[in-house]
Image (cartoon, rainbow, N blue to C red):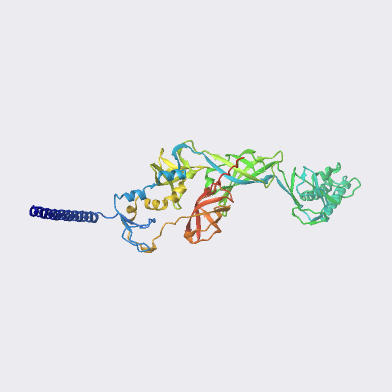
Amino acid sequence: MKLATKNMNGKSKLGKVIWGLVALLLIGLGYWSGMQRSVHVAQQNVTAQAERKPLFYRNPMGLPDTSPVPKKDAMGMDYIPVFAGDESVAGSSQHVTISVEKIQKLGVKNIVVGKQVFTQTVRAVGRVEPNERSIHIIAPKFEGWVEQLHVNTTGAEVHVGQALFEAYSPELLSAQREYQIAVQGAAAMKNASPEALANMNNLVNSSLARLKNWDVAPETLRPQSEAGVSKSDVNKSGEIKRTITFRSPVRGIVLDKLALKGMRFMPGETLFKIADLSKLWVIADVFEQDIALLKTGQAAQVSIDAFPGKELTTHISYIYPTINEQTRTAQVRLELNNADGQLRPGMFAQVTLAIKNNQQAVLVVPDVAIIYSGRRELVLVDLGAGKFEPRVVKLGRQSDDQIEILAGVAEGEKVVVSANFLIDAESNLKAAIAGFGEQSAPARTANKAPQGDNDVQPAQTHRGVGILDATDAGSVTITHSAIAALGWPAMSMNFNLAHAGLIKGIKPGEEIDFEFVERQPGVWEVTKIIKVAQPAPTRKGH
């Protein structure tokens, strides 16, 4: 029994060893077969990769830079080849993908692009000025002295014929004496021969013409029945008046009073400036790009800052033919009635002109949908499922809050109108736009040789946060926080504007987010400004 049991145990151990060897053999065969298959697949991939030629090479760090040939970046990293049909190409160059949660957090909104009749509104700042046709200057044509002032304050209201001042002049006194002698001689020779009487009358007329040439007022000349002539300011006793009275030629306001009692004046010197303010001008400064939209006779609405809520209706009476080189604006003249005298020269006015060039419907989008990248304008087209495509558009006319689209989007497509600036920041949109290029990077670079490190790169966009300090024609002053990308500390500096519409609705002192590029060495230009929304004040419970 013991011998049989020992034989049975020996056979059992031998069987286990044999099965173990078989298992090891099967595992070895499986491993060898897998390795052969992997080598075969790798060889197939290498062969396929060798047959496929890369379209271009992209920056390994995702920067907006491509190359038609292999190259390294500044850190020595190889550029990544991009082949036709790569999913990464379509994902990076054709659209930007954002999760639904992030879309909800950003508050993304879109609108459907549609057609409508486009109405442009031109707005301009103006000032009230006197009507140049109603301005009169009192400037004597002879030398003299101011003996007496009847109107001695600037701003005084005067009437036609009202005495302004009395002047003494030796020349005028001498001319009156000559005229008196001529008149008396004509009277004494009334019985003389006709020829002698005619000569004396010619002398009288010459003396009288001299007085009239000096603008002696007609009412100072009294008619004389004898000889059909007039004598100058000679009273019944035969005395000559020592001074002459200057009177106002119009009803109006004294704008300038340079005359002082006792002062000496020279011929042509201005002593009074009087204007009739019953009709006034509004001179508006219109931007250069809007001049082509205006024409004489167009209706306009004028609101005066001194009278909020009051609008005056008028029309364009004249468009000046020159441009101010500093402000790049042209002047437009409008006329206003001021019978009640409420308007005053120097007041500021806001001028609004609504212009309808034609009644044809055109594609329009809100101005907030446009992203200004510096060299071109884009919109974000909502493709659905969290995908947004940056698309280059061609802009047309612009109104207060809408812009005409000439090319780039079609009617019925959806474009983002809210949070597009945040999408730009969150998803590195600039890299997507650069990869998007002019629709095809390979087509742009296929026939180009490598140009080395001196290639002209597109202007890099920088972002900042700050306070809008002041605005001027074509420029703004911004106090911004530190900008690490440029190594700038917090400071206040001046920027050029890509276009004047960027600061519409933003007032000095408000907090802003802005984008800017370096157009030329040391010349910085703002391409986008967004006012930072202020949080609503919280209410305390009782």
274 or 382: nearer the viewer: 382
Q: Residue 312's spot in the image, x, y percent? A: 63, 38
Q: Residue 406's spot in the image, x, y percent? A: 43, 43
Task: Mark yes or no: residue 168 visible.
Answer: no
418 or 250: nearer the viewer: 418
508 or 335: nearer the viewer: 508
**Count of numbered labels shown in the rendering:** 0
Q: Which corner quadrant of the image does residue 99 belong to? A: top left
Q: Residue 510's spot in the image, x, y percent? A: 57, 50
Left/right of residue 356 with respect to residue 280 in the rendered view: left
Q: Residue furthest front?
A: 1
Left/right of residue 189 with respect to residue 29 in the rendered view: right
Q: Which corner quadrant of the image does residue 64 belong to? A: bottom left
Q: Residue 15's spot in the image, x, y percent? A: 12, 53
Instruction: Please state, as top left, top right, bottom left or bottom right, where the C terminus lies in the image.
Output: top right
Task: Mark yes or no: residue 19 visible.
Answer: yes
Left/right of residue 4 with respect to residue 275 in the rendered view: left
